[in-house]
Amino acid sequence: MGVTLKKLAREIGCELHGDSDCIVSAVGTLQNAGMGQVSFLANAKYRHYLKTTQASAVIVWPQDLPLSRTNALVSNNPYLAFAKAARLLNPEPQVVAGVHATAVVEGDAVVDPTASIGAHCYIGAGSFIGSGVVIGPGCVVEHGVSMGANSRLVARVTLCHDVCIGANVLIHPGVVVGGDGFGIANDGGHWIKVPQLGSVVIGDDVEIGANTTIDRGALEDTVIEEGVKLDNQIQVAHNVRIGAHTAIAGCAAIAGSTTIGKRCQIGGAVGIVGHLFIADDVHITAMSLVTGNITHAGVFSSGIAAQPRSEWVRNAARVRQLNEIAQRLRGLEKRLDEE
Amino acid sequence: MGVTLKKLAREIGCELHGDSDCIVSAVGTLQNAGMGQVSFLANAKYRHYLKTTQASAVIVWPQDLPLSRTNALVSNNPYLAFAKAARLLNPEPQVVAGVHATAVVEGDAVVDPTASIGAHCYIGAGSFIGSGVVIGPGCVVEHGVSMGANSRLVARVTLCHDVCIGANVLIHPGVVVGGDGFGIANDGGHWIKVPQLGSVVIGDDVEIGANTTIDRGALEDTVIEEGVKLDNQIQVAHNVRIGAHTAIAGCAAIAGSTTIGKRCQIGGAVGIVGHLFIADDVHITAMSLVTGNITHAGVFSSGIAAQPRSEWVRNAARVRQLNEIAQRLRGLEKRLDEE
Amino acid sequence: MGVTLKKLAREIGCELHGDSDCIVSAVGTLQNAGMGQVSFLANAKYRHYLKTTQASAVIVWPQDLPLSRTNALVSNNPYLAFAKAARLLNPEPQVVAGVHATAVVEGDAVVDPTASIGAHCYIGAGSFIGSGVVIGPGCVVEHGVSMGANSRLVARVTLCHDVCIGANVLIHPGVVVGGDGFGIANDGGHWIKVPQLGSVVIGDDVEIGANTTIDRGALEDTVIEEGVKLDNQIQVAHNVRIGAHTAIAGCAAIAGSTTIGKRCQIGGAVGIVGHLFIADDVHITAMSLVTGNITHAGVFSSGIAAQPRSEWVRNAARVRQLNEIAQRLRGLEKRLDEE
C-alpha cells in the first residue's frame, strides 16, 4: 500500500532531496512518526523536532532543508503538500451503493443508483439524491431537497425541506440546514411568527462542522457560496450570504441578512450582528464582536485576553468608568493649558 | 389560490389605498417581488426601494403612503401585518394523522388519533401525545412526556423523560429538552454527579430554535413560560425560569437558577451567570455578559466593537493597565490641587 | 422505599442530630420539601429558609446546626452529602439487556449480552459494546468504536468511527464525538481538506452534556482524561487534551492542540485559542478569552459586566481610544515633571 518518495514528490508537487526509492505508507507527527511515515514542518514552534524525528521523510520549506536529517520533500506550502500526501496515503473508504433496508424513501423521491442511503434515514417526497452521494445513518432529508454529486452527510444530519446542496459537499453529524429563521413580529407584547419562506443554497465543495445550524431565509435564500469551510457549532441566521472560500472557526454566530465577502477568515466565537456588509479578504480574530460594516480588507479584533482575576477585577471596574476618566484627563489638560 | 386586496386588507387589519380587486397570491421583498406579490416596508434602510418595486401591493406605515407607487396597505405595524399576510398566503401544510410503520410507540403511551408520528420516531412508556401534534422523522420522546395540542417537533428532536410541553409549541431539529443539568459536587478533587430530579415545563406558544438545549431542573423544574421565543443554539441551564413573551437570540447562554422576566429581549451570544434575577422588559444587547441582578427595565450592554487589529492591540493592552492609569490620573489631579 | 435517618447518615457520612428512626424517601429544596423529605443548605444565600423549612431533615455545615429547627445531618461538605443522599433515594432505573428489534448491528460488531441497544440505533462494523452499556434510542455508533463497561449514551448521540470511550461514561443527547477536526490548507485562495486521521479517547467517569462536540485528532488523538465533566454545547477541537477531573461549563470553546491541566474549572462561554498550555488547578471565569499560556494555578478573567447602555456606549467608545488616552496622560505627567 506504500508509495515511493519519487512518486509521492511528483503527486504532491515537492522537490525530493534524498532516497527516491524509499517507500512510505502513512503520515505522522514529527515527534511520533517512525519508519515508513512521512511528516511535515509548517509551524516554526515545532522546528526543533526536525533534529530528532524518526520519520522516513519530512515535508519542509526550502529554508528548513539544511536542518533536515532525513529524506526531505521541499515545498513552498508544506501544510498543503502534507494535506495532499495524507489524502493519497489515506483514500476515502469505498461505500456500497444502495438504500439500507431500514431507510424510508418516499415514493416520488429520486435516488441515484450509485448513491448510498444508510440505516434509519428518511428521504422526503420529491427529493433528489445525486450520483455518488453518501448519506450516513440516522439522517433526515425532508421533501424537495436536492443534493449534488458526491456530497456526503456523515450521520444524523437534518436537511429541511427544499434546501439545495451542491456537489462534493461534506456535512458532519448534528448539522441542521434549513431550520426556520428567527422571524417574529411583536403584536402588543406577544410575538407572532413570521413564516420563513426562503430556503438555503449551499455551493460546491462546502464543508460544515458538527452541530452547526444554517437557517432558511425569510423570503429569499440564505446562501453559502462554493468552497466555504464552516467549523462546528456555528450559527448562520436567515438571509446571511457567505462568500466563496471563506473559512469560519467554531462557535461563531452571524445574525440575519449579513453579507460576508469572499476569502474571509472569521475566528472562533466571533459575533457579527445583522444587516451588515463585510468586504472580501477580511480577517476577524477570535471572540470579536462586529457591529458595523467592514468595507475593506484587513484584520479586525475586539477580544480582551484574560489576566489574573485580582488585577482584572480592578481594571474591569475602571472600564465602566472610562468616559469619566477621559473627561477628567481632558479637564487636567485644560487646567494646565490655562496656567 | 389568490386573495383580493380588499379581503387581505380586512384579514390583516390594514387600510387599503388602491385597487381593491387586485389579486395577490404570494409575498416577496421590495427588491424582487413582482406582479401578484405583496411586499412591505418596515426597515427605513430599504425605503428607497418603494420607488422601484414591482410588487402589486406594499404594506407601509402611514407616513410612507405618499412614497408608494403601487397599491398600499397602511398599517401602524407593517411587519406584523406582513407576518399575517405571509401566513394567510402560505398556510401550514396539512399532515396526515397516524403512526409511521417504522416508529416505535411503547405499549402504554397514548397517542391521540389525530396526531402524526413520523418515520423512526420513538415514543416512550407513559407518554401522552395530544391532538393534532406532529412529530417529524427521527425524534426521541422518552417515557412520561406530555405534549399539548397542535405542538410540533420538526425532526430529530429529543424530549427527555417526564418533560411537559404545552400547546402550539414548535421545536426545531436537534433540540434537546430535559438533558441533565450540570450538577456536580466536589469530593476531594473528584466530581460526584448530583442527580437531576426535576423536569422541564414549557408553556403554550413557545418556539425553540435548532440545536438549542434546555436542561432539566436539579430538584424543581426548569420553566419556559408561554409565548417565549428562543433562537438556535441557546443554552438554558437547570432551574432557569424564562418569563412569558421573552425573546432570546442565537447562542445566548443562561446559567443555572437564573430568573428572567417577562417581555425581555436578549441579544445573540449574551452570557448570563447563575442565580440572578432579571426584571421584566429588560433588553440586553449582543455579546454582553450579565454578572449581577438587573432590577429594573432598560437596555444593558457590555460588548465592544471590533476595530483594526493594529489599533486594537494597543488599546487592549491598556485595558489591562487601566487601574494603574486611573491611579496615575488621580495622582496628577492631587499634584495640581496641591500646587 | 424510605430509609431511616440513622441509615442515611451512615451512608452519606454525616453526623445525625435528631430522630434516628425518622424515615425519609425523597429529596427537596429547603423552600418546598415536606414531610419525608431531606434537604440541604450549601449556598449561604438560602440560609434564611432554615427557619421555615418543612423538610424532615436538613444537611448542614457544622456552623449552621444551631439554626436548624428539624433533624440535622451535619457535614463538612453538605452539597456532596446531598448528592449521595439524592442518589441513594433515587437509584438509576434498571434497563433491560438486549438489542431492540429496530436496531441495526453490523455483523462483526460485538455487543455484550448485558448491554442494552435501543430503538433505531446503528452499531457499525467492528465496534465493541461492553458489559452493562446502555445505548438509548436513535444513536449512531460508527465502525471500530469501543465503549467500556456501564457507559451510557442517553439518546441521539453520534460516536464516529474508531473513537474509544472508557467505563462509566455518560453522554447526553446530541453529542458528537469524533467528527472531523477543522483542518484546511490554503491552495491559492481555495481550501483543501486535511484528512483527520487521529481519533478521540475518553477516559473513565467522564460526563458530556447535550450537543457538545469533540473533534477527532488530525494525526494523533484528542484526549479527555478520566473524571472530566463537560456541560452542554462545548466545542473541543482536534488534538485538545483535557486533564483529569477538570470541569467545563456550557458553551466554552477550546481551539486545536491546546492542553488543559487537571482539576481546572472553566466557566461558561470561555474561549481558549489553539496551541496553548494551561496548568493544573486553573480557574477561568465566564466569557473570558485566553490567548496565552497559563503556567501556574490561579483564577483568570477578562469578561466585562453589562451596564446601562447609555453609560456603556460612552465607555466602550473610550476603550477604542485607550492607547491615545494613556499617551495623553503620560504627556501630562512629563509636562508636570518638567515644570
Image (cartoon, coloured by chain):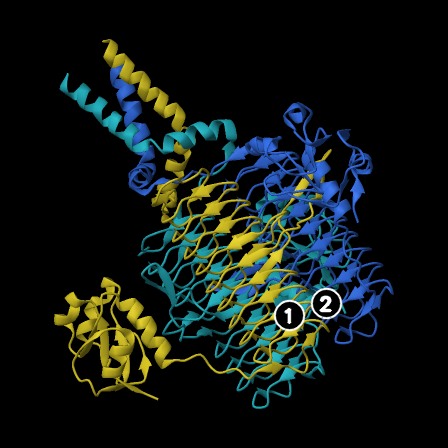
Chain colours: A blue, B cyan, C yellow
Q: Quadrant of the N terminus of chain B?
A: bottom right
Q: Residue furthest top?
A: C339
Circle 1/circle 2 CB separation < 8 Å: yes
**Residue occupying image coordinates x 86% and y 64%:** A112
Q: Which residue is drawn at the image coordinates 51% and 80% (left, top)?
A: B145
Give me the chain letter of mark 1: B
Secondary structure found at label 1: loop
Q: Which residue is mark 1?
A: B155
Q: Which residue is mark 2?
A: A142
Q: Nearer the viewer, residue A85 or A288?
A: A85
Residue type, label 1: Ala
Please give left or right for residue B172 compared with residue B93 in the image.
Answer: left
**Residue A44 visible here:** no
The answer to whether residue C22 is left or right of residue A134 is left
Q: Residues within 10 Å of mark 2 (few under 14, many from 20)?
A: many
Whether residue B27 is visible to the viewer of this picture, yes or no, is: yes
Residue C115 lies in what quarter of the image? bottom right
Give the quarter of the figure containing the C terminus of chain B: top left
